[in-house]
Image (cartoon, grey):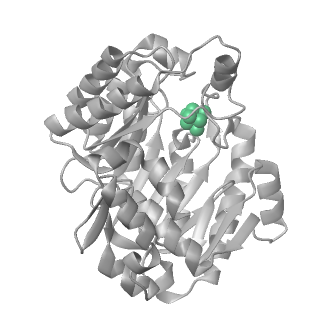
Amino acid sequence: MALGIYIHVPFCLGKCSYCDFVSYRWVHDKVDAYLEALAKETRMRSKELSGNNRQVESLYIGGGTPTCLKREEILFVVKNCSFHFDLLPGAEISLEANPGTVSMEKLEFLYSNGINRLSIGAQACQEWLLKLLGRKHSFEDVQDAVRSARKAGFKNISIDLIFGTPGQTTGDWNESLQRVIELAPEHISAYGLHLAAGTPLNERVSKGELEVLEEEIWLEMYEEAIEVLAAAGFEHYEISNFALPGRQCRHNLLYWRNLPYLGLGPAAFSYLNNRRFGNEKSLEKYIQKINEEKPAEAESETLPQRIRMAETVILGLRLLKGIDLNEFALRFGKRLEEVYPGQIDKFVRLKLIEYDGKNVRLTRKGLAVSNQVFVEFI
Ligand code: SF4
């Protein structure tokens, strides 16, 4: 089965106030050592895999802000991967890009060298919200980035938005949705803000400087996204993701279907041969381990079938089409209804899950409270 590869580029122009991803302030001195280690890690991992297992159907370069890197450095990441792995014809090659770090020339160069999908972080269209979130760009920069990407040839653009930020109104959210729709992307991700411990935004909430939105407003915003994006022709295919027909993110579909992927770079996670492992989060430790010719892993776990089944259910229920019951039975040698009879009956009764004998999926009501459903499968 073909793999997905995720590459973590751990640099950003600065830290956003809500961010708990592993990223460092971009300092060019560190980039060479990072790229050298990444190249070695790619080679080491490819040697562990043989033949068909080296076939790759999607490559996702994320971070961080990969577009902090120079265009030749980004190309090096792609070329290095295609040198050690077999990138299949038509593979999806996605690059996360932040507005303000992508010129027309850079995008033209990247598109002409095989990157065929761009994921642009917009988050909101109001300047005060962008400032509160600690973003380093304006909404005009978002518009410029999308225009440049189109001129460069990109035909597959995704835009990220965040809702549920303290102080945000449903009117603000509707405006952000409308202005992003006007940019005519093929894909939109609408994430509810997660207040992560240790982030400046969370600290301000803890100190009482900012107030979290009431759950009712949060749900209203989520419903609004579903309605507004459907009216604009976007298919709601995953809890937080919407796409024009045929434009679902193939890489992320691998995660939601709980299929194998390889993560490279600091803090990257992999799931291969029923084993999940995560690399060192610290860039220094990552580089040191790789330079000592050791795997960069900091944690590893072989997952028993019970856990693999639970994860397949939890991830699969994120998809609006739900879990294919035959596929589940073929994979695990057991029918899902046999493994979780109590949970399925309970959630069907509560109208949080729909079960038709072929698929099991969350209902519209279930989507809004998905976490409450997921915990009962663990
Ligand atoms: S751009 Fe993304 S990874 Fe970088 S600090 Fe902001 S949220 Fe975090």
Say if 225 sits above or below 173 in the image.
below
Task: Say left or right for 277 vs 149.
Answer: right
- Foreground of the two, 29 or 286: 286
Percent position of residue 169, x then y: 38, 15
Quadrant of the rendered image containing residue 200? top right
Report the residue at 78% width, 56% height from top. Answer: 287
- Foreground of the two, 136 or 193: 193
Report the residue at 65% width, 25% height from top. Answer: 202
Total numbered badges shown on the rendered structure: 0
Percent position of residue 246, x then y: 21, 57
- Foreground of the two, 220 or 98: 220
Report the residue at 39% width, 55% height from top. Answer: 318
Residue 116 seen in this snapshot: yes
Percent position of residue 219, x then y: 37, 31
Say if 296 sits above or below 137 in the image.
below
Q: Please state, as top left, top right, bottom left or bottom right, where the N terminus lies in the image.
A: bottom left
Quadrant of the rendered image containing residue 223? top left
